[in-house]
Image: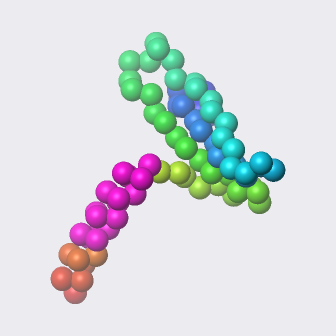
Amino acid sequence: MAMLFNIDLKLYYIAESGLSKEEFNFSTEESKMKPKKVQLYIAPDGYFDTVYEKSFVKSAGICQSLVLDVKNCCL
């Protein structure tokens, strides 16, 4: 799917040596759009979760606080 949609994919997983990473760069220069980047962590049991940059997590936390404050104010 990543190849079909021109997505740069990073997979993180736990190996014998610790946390490891595999990168797959499927974006092409022919695409006029900025390449999309996706980071996933794959757990040993096969489940996966998205990995976000620290700056995104901080911004999301601020947005969540605002939403909760508005919600609590209006109830």
Quadrant where the C terminus lies? bottom left
Q: Position of residue 66 (x, y in %)?
A: 24, 69
Say which of 74 and 58 sits in front: 58
Q: Is residue 18 magenta?
A: no
Q: Position of residue 26 (x, y in %)?
A: 58, 25
Q: Position of residue 38 (x, y in %)?
A: 52, 40
In this rendering, the answer to whether 6 lies above or below 62 is: above
| Residue sitting at x 54%, y 52% | 50
Residue 60 as seen in the image, left or right of residue 70: right
In this rendering, the answer to whether 65 lies above or below 23 is: below
| Residue sitting at x 77%, y 60% | 45
Say which of 1 and 10 sits in front: 10
- The answer to which image quadrant residue 21 occupies is top right
Residue 62 as seen in the image, left or right of residue 18: left
- The answer to which image quadrant residue 70 occupies is bottom left
Say which of 10 and 46 sits in front: 10
Range covered by the magenta-colored residues = 53-67
- Residue farthest along the front direction in this orientation: 17
Quadrant where the N terminus lies? top right
In this rendering, the answer to whether 12 lies above or below 5 is: below
